Image (cartoon, rainbow, N blue to C red):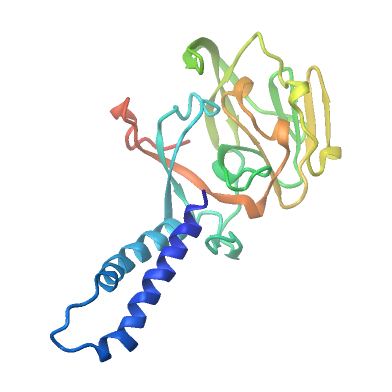
Amino acid sequence: MNFALIMLIALLVTGAIWLFDIYLGKPRRVKEAKEPVLVEYARSFFPVILAVFLLRSFLVEPFKIPSGSMLPTLLVGDFILVNKFTYGIRLPVINAKIIDVSQPQRGDVMVFRYPEDTSLDYIKRVVGLPGDRVVYRDKHLYINDKPMTMEDRGEQFNYVKSGLNYVTAQRTYEQLGSHQHAVLLLSDLPPVRLGDVRTFPSRANCDYNESGFSCTVPEGHYFMMGDNRDDSNDSRYWGFVPDRNIVGKAFMIWWNFSDFKRIGQAIN
């Protein structure tokens, strides 16, 4: 569901009804005549819809985390806020950038429109920038032939998958750009599930084998991975994210019904 499109249609309809009444309806009404209910609703809702539309389109948009692909950074059920102008001002609905502000950086947690179905919003971590050579070998990440620092503190992280499957993962800490963040690794799973790799644009830029993969990111695109590395459907499987698909940068958890301590936490 394209909520921005629905909001735009509601804005245009209520605005048109209100303007029609101002210039054509009201001058023809008898002074004592009551304002039509439809006009009353349009006049009342138009400024509210306008404020919400502008806020969601250009400033901040809320999202709910539906899956565990970004564990342990984001939990299922977290409600997050996404900064819509960090990476540039974009026109709502068509998502065309009109003002460039800054570019995504390695380690940013970014919301984007899923390349295979742009009606879906995904959230992952930016791993590869345009032109980067991303290598993931034996569950260790290399960017432009430089290994990313991994710190194993001997920690475990437990969570429940769909179907009430209890999972115990190894929690390690990765340095990616200016971000040090936790990632989860499952020792019994491979670095990439070769059978799940699809055909995608610029697939020729990638090479896969049992120990991992290497990909060169095309210009104007980004390579995204989930922090729950062995349980994430990400760029390893469906390819690169074009700049036009970017929604914004996730920056804060604003609500979680199950854990109030998470409210107000910054997203690193």
Q: Is residue 47 left or right of residue 8?
A: left
Q: Is residue 31 left or right of residue 88?
A: left
| Image x and y of residue 163, in percent | 51, 14
Q: Pick the residue in front: 254 or 119.
A: 119
Q: Measured along the vertical axis of the image, is residue 51 above or below residue 34?
A: above
Is there any visible trace of residue 108 in the rendered image? no
* Residue that appears at 69% across and 35% down: 235
* Residue that appears at 47% across and 15% down: 159
Is there any visible trace of residue 85 in the rendered image? yes
Name, please, the residue furthest toward the left.
Answer: 32
Q: Pick the residue in front: 83 or 25.
A: 25
* Residue that appears at 37% across and 59% down: 52
Q: Is residue 126 left or right of residue 21?
A: right
Q: Measured along the vertical axis of the image, is residue 185 above or below residue 84?
A: above
| Image x and y of residue 102, in percent | 57, 56
Residue 94: quarter of image: bottom right
| Image x and y of residue 197, in percent | 76, 28
| Image x and y of residue 178, in percent | 55, 38
Q: Pick the residue in front: 179 or 35.
A: 35
Q: Is residue 97 left or right of residue 11?
A: right
Q: Measured along the vertical axis of the image, is residue 252 above or below residue 45?
A: above
Residue 53: quarter of image: bottom left
Residue 253: quarter of image: top left
* Residue that appears at 78% across and 47% down: 218
Number of numbered markers: 0
